Image (spheres, rainbow, N blue to C red):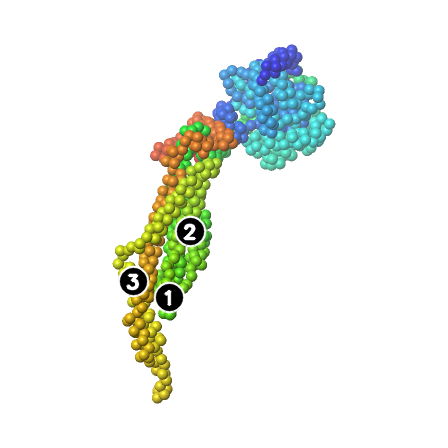
Amino acid sequence: MGAAETASMTNKSEAASASTDHGAKPQAIGTSSLDAFQSKDSRKVMDIVDKLRRSGLSVIVQLPQLVVSGDQSSGKSSVLEAITEIPFPRKENLCTRFATEIILRRATSVSISTKIIPDKQRPSTEKKRLEQLRSTIVDFIELPNLMEEATNLMGLGDDGSGTARAFSRDVLGIEIAGPGRPHLTLVDLPGLIHSENKMQSKEDVELIRGLVDDYIKEKRTIIMAVVSAKNDYAKQIILKNCRDIDPKGNRTIGIITKADFLESGSENEASWIKLAGNKDIFFELGWHMLKNRSDKEASKSFAERNAAETAFFSSGRYRDLDPDMLGIESLRCRLSQMLYKHLKAELPSLQKELNENHREVCNDLEKLGEKRAIAREQSRFLMHMSQDYQDVVKAAVNGQYEHDFFGNLDPNASIDHDSNMRRLRAVVQYLNLQFASAMRQHGHKVLTDAGEEGKLSPENDKQVTEPALDDDYAQFASYQVTEKRTDAIERARRRILKLIADFHIEKVASVCANFVEAAMNYTVAPDVADRLQSMRVDPGLISRLKRAKAELMSTVTDNKHHPITYDPAYTAMVEKMCQKKHESKLQHLVQQAEVDVKNADKDQTDRYLQIDVMRGGMGELLQPDMEETSAEDALDSQQAYCKEEVKYFIGAVTKQVIERYLLRDLAADTISPMVIGDMTDDEIAFVAAEPEETTRLRGNLETRKSTLEKGQETFKSALGLFKCADLQVIYSRDSSAMLQKYSCTGANGTYHTRKSAAGYEEGHVSATRTA
């Protein structure tokens, strides 16, 4: 609060001291009525709630409280004043235009402090202005001035401009502390408005109804539904709202005020007494009747007020009612017992909700990863991330698919589908088989037809059944042409080995790149992945592909040199090809010499060989054209050599190129601790520094986590306090499992909770009870 505002508050306090509405001498904070809430057992439970509230937990989970609500002018503030004996100001429209939270708590010294809790919808600048109201007094007589100051800060004061608002969703918090005070929160809400008028707009009507509903719908709130006997209760909005929100009346108590306005002995009085007897509108918590001070009785003390109320209910039909449902003294006792039962019943669910919130916050923090505010945190973050990445990539390269990253195999999906592509070793193995088959089938530029021999040359004799080729690899069949063997003898052979190998390398490199992207998306934070991809991963993959292609060129270049082989299978293959070639020529000669002759005696056709044809052909076989024979032998040798060369080439590409340069050290060349270690501080900051919004989110989550953990510690320490017969605690510790277990047995059953290294786990209520 600024200096001007402080001075203003001081002046108003001085004025209030001279002319208070209550007319009496200044009243100290130590009122005795609050002690009625402090039974021995209830104080223990209220202690827990107060500790939770002071830890800041009320902004995360809803804590038990009493809410006073009713229609406008129903006497809500008078009820609250009578319960607490706190002299709230009676100036018109001062304390009924916003919610007022009265927080009572025990302290060694007496004080009243006030603050404004701004509406969440207010701009940040307005929130800061409202939060400046932080004042402390030591006498109730100064309270009206504090509340008026809050009213003006909220923009509800009449400054003569005609722009003041009628109501606000801001909340005024009044904390009253002192020795022997109970831990309790009561909330006074603005009165519900039936319809708009000149002073209250339609928007005001909706604002108040929404505000009241927000409070009374909370499952841990006890609703004090105040109805005035001056008006027909069937038309008072609060009763309908309570029945809609709390249909069984489990947490609603009806409070009837202004009973002194009823005509004694009238039917109207009888109907209200019937209502008070819970025989019309039923609430499980019942009803209660009060006679509050009227405006004319404002100067009377609380003792005088209570005496007048006792005298009033001691006459007429009220003598037939249960005394426990009449007057302020019995109401305090009822509320004390009600609060104790309510709070004790709500503690298990409150702890459960607290633990669930803690788990959610921890999960959200885990999703954000490690903190990355300074260079050391950023470097450590990248190191841990690279280790997770390496685990995944190494497992994929080794064909070990136990990690969760690999998921389930989809046999109906394509090999490069995301569900299958992650199994990198299996995918590359499949592509290598496709490459090898494509090389054997389509690795030669020209297929040779035997021509006059009438069959394909021996090089095309298939000794294995080739697998069906995918379209990517089957396309190389279109690059081949077929020519006669005689034409092949006259030309040098050309092959497409490099073309198929180059395609295969590009294919495997693309699979590796897609796999690396999937592994990064799994192990690396999204905001880091893109920067790391462009700075380190993409250059690493490009470098590996370049080296793979360089190795391929070396292999192809070696094959262009003088053909050398030391494999005895080559000689055997050449001899076999020569033998098959001669057998083919002989068979062709026989076919030419064959002639069919009709045998008239046997009425059949016999086949004979023509001697002259056989002699001429045999002469050519025995004395061939040496130049042509040399050419044929050269072609046969080349075909035999090519078969051996294809085998070698397949092995060289799959082992020396694919394995060495595309699979081996894939993790080390993309993201590894060594790669991270070689980065400069500026590079690390560029890659790992978290966005500003992430930093803010992390800060909010860490604050919530700390608050929740304080709440958990409060429960942990409180459970050890309850040694009484009504709330017995059994504590045990399993040292082997590092597990703490608690069993809290009371009127509602046995509540179990436990804490392990991972944090508090959800508890449950059993049906067993302990005597």
Circle 1 sits on which residue?
A: 486
Compared to residue 541, the image places residue 155 above or below, namely: above
Left or right of 729 on screen, residue 92: right
Q: Quadrant of residue 64?
A: top right
Residue at 32%, 62% in the rendered image = 634
Please, what is the three-letter code of the amino acid marked with disc 2?
Phe
The amino acid type of the residue labelled 1 equals Thr
- Quadrant containing the N terminus is top right
Image location (x, y in percent) of residue 644: 32, 57
In contact (CB < 8 Å): disc 3 and disc 1: no
Q: CA distance from mark 2 to mark 3?
A: 31 Å
Residue at image position (40%, 53%) is 500
At 39% across and 52% down in the image, what residue appears?
A: 498
Q: Nearer the viewer, residue 58 or 150?
A: 150
Looking at the rendered structure, the secondary structure element under dot 1 is helix
* Residue depicted at x 33% and y 51%: 558
| CA–CA distance in space, label 3 to label 1 | 18 Å
Residue 562 falls left or right of residue 94: left
Residue 494 x %, y %:
38, 57
Kind of residue at disc 3:
Val
Label 2 with label 1: CB-CB less than 8 Å: no
Badge 3 element? helix
Q: Where 328 sits versus 689, above or below?
A: above
Q: Is residue 473 left or right of residue 302?
A: left
- The residue closer to the viewer here, 599 or 423, is 599
Please give the residue where the numbered disc 3 appears in the rendered image. 574
- Of mark 3 and mark 1, the one earlier in the sequence is 1
Residue 194: x %, y % from top left: 69, 31
Q: Residue 32 versus residue 654: which sits nearer the camera?
A: 654
Label 2, label 1: how many angstroms apart (C-alpha)?
32 Å
